[in-house]
Image (cartoon, helix red, strand yellow):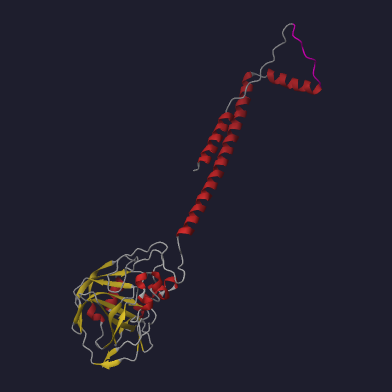
Amino acid sequence: MSKSFFLFVSACLMSLALANEPISKPSKPSPPKEGEHVAAEPKAESKAAAKEEQKAAKEPKGKLDSKAAELARIKDAQAADDLAAKIADKLVEIRKEKEEVAKAAVRSGTRTALPRHAHPSTPEKSTDKHGEKASPGEHKAGVIHWSYEGDGGPANWAKLDAPNSLCESGLRQSPIDIRDSIRVNLDAIELNYKSQSFSVIDNGHTIQVNLSGGNYLNVSGKTYELVQFHFHRPSEERINGRNAEMVMHLVHKDRDGKLAVLALLIVAGQPNAIVQSVWNNLPLEKNEAAQAIVKIDVAQLLPKNRDYYTYMGSLTTPPCSEGVLWMVMKEMVELSEEQISIFARLYPMNARPIQKPNGRLIKESK
């Protein structure tokens, strides 16, 4: 409270103390002494008042004391009520002042929208990129985090954080519409997957499955280890202009940190046991990993036909890093309508728009 308010309360308390002083008793008029001059008799009004005073003076002492105490009690109660009312009014005034100060601080210190073509002063680092295991990220107050719509949508990704510049300026960005490919004898994709433990996390952008390790993909003489897989709806990749209902991205990394993504396009059909195990272990809260007590064999996710499209591209999420090897399986895999609807309830749309091919070469299996 302010100093002025404490002074006000002190003044009120002093007033209350003064109000508690006893009322002085009326004194009996003493008879005139011998030789003392007696004033002339007053007029009629004065006579009446004098009679009342004489009458009151003749009342018993106990009765006078009782009246004085009652009058003092009434004054005390009135003074206390007045003081309480003034204190309550002052508290309301102080509370309003504090609320106004707090609102002004919020308005001046928090930004709720990102102006176009402006960079936030304290950019946030992305913690849920392709190729990395997701961990609980901290979204800084007042900083817009990337998303799939609004101010944080794909059109603004490059403006949200300086490391995201390739999202706008890159020439090998993903996803793309796969068309005008050349048919050649591609190297077979060799998979060395095994049953392993896993955890599931909702990182605020997708459902992601982190794996314990020891699963490898070999292609064109290079070996990549499977790190995680996640989902998008609809599929980010298109084949001759057409999306699939969903896509699963299996993200692999080699010893040098280079990425290779195996994309499985998804259509409605038969239920998938591996995906059902993932749905069974969905976490109740975002950014809190749920460790499954069962194991999964990721090899069971892949179609029997291993023909594929391949091209060089980028991550489809910020920071949109390029130099990623993409392999999109030509044969689609199936999930049941119910399994697709479960993901759709969580993420109705989490797909980056199609990017320009910029003359890049796209190959497909014969």
Q: Residue 269, position in %: x, y?
A: 33, 84
**Lateral position of residue 60 relative to residue 196, left or right:** right
Q: What is the magenta segment's predominant secondary structure?
A: loop
Question: Is 37 in the magenta?
Answer: yes
- The part of the chain drawn in magenta is 35-43
Task: Classify the position of the C terminus by image quarter.
Answer: bottom left
Quarter location, residue 195: bottom left
Find the residue positioned furthest to the right.
43
Above or below: residue 7 compared with residue 33 = below
Question: Is 176 in the magenta?
Answer: no
Above or below: residue 265 compared with residue 207 = below
State whether residue 341 appears in this view.
no
Q: Nearer the viewer, residue 172 or 87?
A: 172
Quarter location, residue 218: bottom left
Q: Nearer the viewer, residue 69 or 222?
A: 222
- Residue plotted at (50% across, 52% down): 101
Above or below: residue 71 compared with residue 204 = above
Quarter location, residue 18: top right
Above or below: residue 52 compared with residue 303 = above
Q: Nearer the viewer, residue 111 or 265?
A: 111
Q: Residue 266, position in %: x, y?
A: 33, 82
